[in-house]
Image (cartoon, grey):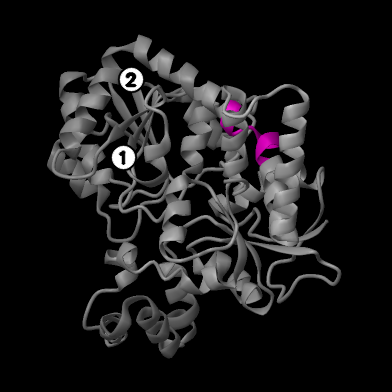
Amino acid sequence: MKVAYFSPFPPERSGIADYSALLVPALRERVDLTVVRRGAKKPPRGTDLAVYHIGNNPEVHGWILDALRRAPGLVVLHDFVLHHLVAGVTIGRRDGHGYLDAMEREGGVVGRLLAHGVLDKRIPPLWENRPEDFPLAGEVLDLATGLVVHSDYVRARVRDVGFDGPVAVVPHPAWPVPDVPAAELAGEPLIGSFGNVNQSKRIPQLLEAFAVLRRERPGSRLLLVGAVSPGFDLDRRLQRLGIDDGGILREGYVDERRLWALMKACDVHVGLRSPTMGETSGSAVRALSLGKPLVVSDAGWFHELPKDVALRVPVGSDEVEVLGAALELLADRPDIRAAMGDAALALATREHDLGRVADLYVAAFETTAGGRGVADAVVREVSEAGAAVGIAPGSAEAQEIARRLAEVDLGA
């Protein structure tokens, strides 16, 4: 199978670029894959399947959406909410009518009126304060001949809006842990948060919970790694909460080697997100690979993390209190941190193994390129092979096989 692969790649500062840099070598061991140069308008001649990585950043994915419009294919949907992408390729290109049409398609007359309000600057941009109410994924789903998603949450969302093509749930692959020493940073414990510092990463709630922990445990430190988003006044918040300079450690954008060194140094990783765009956290997957305990928001993909790996914090009125209790528990109980870390590493090895992820991708490629006939043939061959080795229908082994087939949208 000849596959044309549309994606950002390093040195672009994109989690999806890093994702593809990890995944492509493994895929090339399994299929004839061509990485399409940035800005290309269509797949090369002789392509059996075009694969498009779609995320929410218009600067990174706008050209990929343009190519998808010319030649539909398999979409790797990294975010279900694509409002920012759509706004970027319409309003950002001075195509206000395109944005009006997209909003009307999703929200009817009310959606179009709201879009007029945005264009006239009478209401704040919807992609900043209400993106989850208007995902604007409809055009991409219409163009997709099949989907790869990273969570059952997103699979359910695309089915809810009427996508009836093949959908494969393929876990985010785990990176091999590089041989770099942990950064020498103080903190008992050292708590790390990785990613942009802003409201949607629940940094205000994290700072409030940490301020309480810091008063009770002066040795604790909070490491924030990532750029501060425009309009988010971190220094003012720290001053208001009374967190001294020694309590917060700050680093902006860091290269891959420094990132791993910082992540290795942390005793606890915090990955909060709300509202969720349907994304999967590459930082959280790295933490799993390192065998680190996680504290996450109980939303979207994060909700699917097992409880022995991650303490899940509900978003809402009790968020700060529950988050504070989770941090306090992990600060006081190194034995629980160790047990959660062991479970995290086991999960990364079992579910997020790069070879397994690449195999699931190839199965999705074949199903999308060959249609239902390929899917039926695969299920038939698996059934015959199982029967040949004595796997009985309804047995635990048969149920596990059925679960694995369902991950790539095969079987009942």
* Amino acid bearing label 2: Pro
Relative image position of residue 341 (x, y in whole percent): 45, 19
Q: Which residue lies at the image location 22% right of the left edge and 78% below the top edge?
A: 123
Query: Which residue is outermost to the top?
Result: 335
Viewer-nearest residue: 164 or 148? 164
According to the image, label 1 marks what residue? 298
In the visual, does 104 lie left or right of 374?
Answer: left
The amino acid type, in three-letter code, at marker 1 is Asp
Q: What separation in Å lies between label 1 and label 2 (alpha carbons)?
A: 23 Å
Residue 282: x and y in percent read: 51, 42
Q: Label 2: which residue? A: 189
Q: Which residues are magenta?
A: 350-357
Residue 112 image offset from top left, x and y in percent: 31, 84
Residue 157 in which image quadrant = bottom left
Q: Earlier in the sequence, mark 1 or mark 2?
A: 2
Classify 10 Å Cα crowding around label 1: few (below 14), some (14-19), many (20 and above): some
The image quarter in which residue 165 lies: bottom right
| Quarter of image, res 71 | bottom right
- Does dot 2 land on a helix, a strand or a loop? loop
